[in-house]
Image (cartoon, helix red, strand yellow):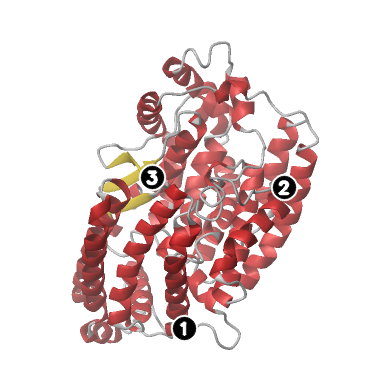
Amino acid sequence: MEKLHAIDREYRHLERTIAALQWDQETYLPPEGVEERAEQLALLEGIAHRRLTEPETGKLLAEAGSSAENPRGDASLPALERDFLRVMRRRYDRAVKLPPDFVTASARAEGLSQAAWAAARQNNDFAAFLPHLRTMIGIARAKAEYWGFGSGSSTRYDGLLDIYEPGMGEAEIGVLFAVLRNRLAALLKKIQGCTPPDTSFLKQSFPIEQQAAFNQKLMDYIGFNRRRGRLDTSAHPFTITLGSDDIRITTRYFPHNLLSGLFSVIHESGHALYEMGFPPELRGACLADGASMAIHESQSRFWENVIGRSRPFWDGLFPLLQNFFPEQFAGVSAGHWYRAVNEVKPSLIRVDADEVSYSLHVILRFELEQQLIAGALEPEELPAAWREKTKEYLGIEIDASSPRSDADGVLQDIHWSMGSFGYFPSYVLGNLYGLQFTRKLRQDIPAFDNLIAAGNFGQIHTWLKDTIYRWGCRLEPAELLQKVTGEPLRVEPFLEYIEGKYGELYH
C-alpha cells in the first residue's frame, strides 16, 4: 500500500505540473509559444502515463487484492484504503489500455487544437478549426474503443460519458433529458407570453477595471480563500487545480455585459470551493477529486444559481455593487436588480443563459456530440446542424453570414477542442444533483435564506464540507447522492425549483 501511495503521489505531481502548463497556455502564453508548449505537454503526458502503467503498479494492485472484479481489494484493509484501491484500479485499467504513443500524440494534438480553436473563435473561422476537430473526434472514438466500448450493448459515446459520469450511459441520460426538454420548453413558451422585467440599466458601460475589483470582493464575500487560489482572465472561464492549496479560476470581461464576468466568477468559485474543501486525509492523493464532473457542476451551479441568483443574496450584496457602479445603478433597487438578473431571454451563449433555457443549450450539444461520435453527423456539417437545433430549441435564428455566426455558435465552447466529448451532460446532471442536495440542505438548515441575506455562509460551507466534500471521490456519484439525500437521481426537484421560482417572477 505504501508503494501504491508513492506511485499515486508521483502521478498526481505530474498531473498538476501538466495542469500548470495548461493554465498558462489559456492565460498568459504568447501565441508563438503554442507549438513548443504542445511538445512539452506531450512529453509530460507520456511520462505520467508510463509511471502509472508500469508493470509494478499492476503487480502491487494484485498483491493488495484489487482486481477488475474486486477493485476495492482485501476486505481486511481500512475503508479509506479500499476506496483508494478502487480509484487506483480504475485509473490503472483505463491507462494501461492506451498505447504510450497514442497518449503522447493525443496530448500534442490537444495542445494544438486548443490554440487553433482560440484563433478560429476570434476570427469567426470554423473552417480553420475543422481539421483539428476531426482529429479530436478520431482520438475520442479511439479512446472509447481501447477501453472496450462500442460493441455489444455499449456505444463509444458511453465510454466517453464514463470518464465524466461513471455508471451513467447515453440511454439513461436521454430519458432524463427528454423530460427536461419538454417541461422547460413549455415553461419557456409561457414566460415568453409574459411582460419581461426592465433590464435597460444593464445595457450601459461597466468599466472592466471596476468589474475586476468588484469580483475580488465578491470572492471574499462568499468565502473563496485567496491565499489558496487566484482569479485570472481567459477566452473561456474555467477552474483548474495546480495543488491542494493552489486552485485557479478564470473569467472573461465585456464592458457592456456585467453579468457574464460576474456570474462566471461565482460559478467557478463553486468549483474551487469544492476543491478546497477536501479533508486532510485525502490531500495529495487520487481520492482528493470530485465524485464526478456532474457532482462538481452541482457545486458550481448551486453557488451560481441557487445562491447567486437568489433574492436574499442580492439583498445583502447589492449595496456593495452599487458602490462600485453608482452612476449605472442610481435609482435601482435590489428587487429591481434581482428581477433583471433572472430575466428569461434565450440567447446564443450558453454560459450567459438564464436558468430556464440553459439546459436546452446543453441538450443541444449532447445530441450533436452523440451524432459526431456515432458518425451520424460529419464534422463539416456541424455549423448547419447547430443553427438548426438553436432555432428548434431556443427559437433563435442564426444568420450564417453574420460576422460572429460561428464565434457565438459552434465555436463558443472550448470543450471539443480539448477532446472533452461526453462532458456537456455534466452541466445539466449537475443541476439535478444540486437541487436534490439543496432540498436536504434546506431541511438541515431552516435559516438558509436568512443566512444568505446576512452574508453569513459559515453554516452552509460546513454542511457542504461535512456531507459532500468530505468524500472526495471515495463514492460513486449515485452512492453519494443516496448517502446525502436518501434518493436516486430525479428531475422533479430541479423542475419544481425552476417552475416555482419563475412562475413567481413572471406571475
Amino acid beneath label 1: Glu
Q: Mark 3 or mark 1, which is nearer the start of the sequence? A: 1
Against 114, is 50 above or below? Answer: below
Left or right for 223, reference 460: left
Against 495, is 68 above or below? Answer: below
Q: CA distance from mark 3 to mark 2?
A: 36 Å
* Quadrant occupied by the N terminus: bottom left
Which label is found at residue 145? 1
Residue 108, by quadrant, is bottom left
Residue 85, by quadrant, is bottom left
Note whether residue 8 is visible.
Answer: no
Left or right for 354, reference 68: right
Task: Name the residue tied to disc 2.
Answer: 395
Q: Nearer the viewer, mark 2 or mark 1?
A: 2
Residue at 64% across, 55% down: 387
Q: Mark 1 or mark 2, which is nearer the start of the sequence? A: 1
CB contact under 8 Å: marks 1 and 3: no
Characterize the local packing of mark 2: few (<14), some (14-19) or many (20 or more) Cα atoms within 10 angstroms.
few
Helix, strand or loop at label 1? It is helix
Q: Nearer the viewer, residue 383 or 52?
A: 383
* Quadrant occupied by the C terminus: top right
Note whether residue 468 is visible.
Answer: yes
Against 3, is 119 above or below? Answer: above
Task: Name the residue tied to disc 3.
Answer: 273
Whole-percent x, y for residue 438 in the image: 57, 45
Q: Nearer the viewer, mark 1 or mark 3?
A: 1
Helix, strand or loop at label 3? It is helix
Residue at 54% across, 47% down: 408
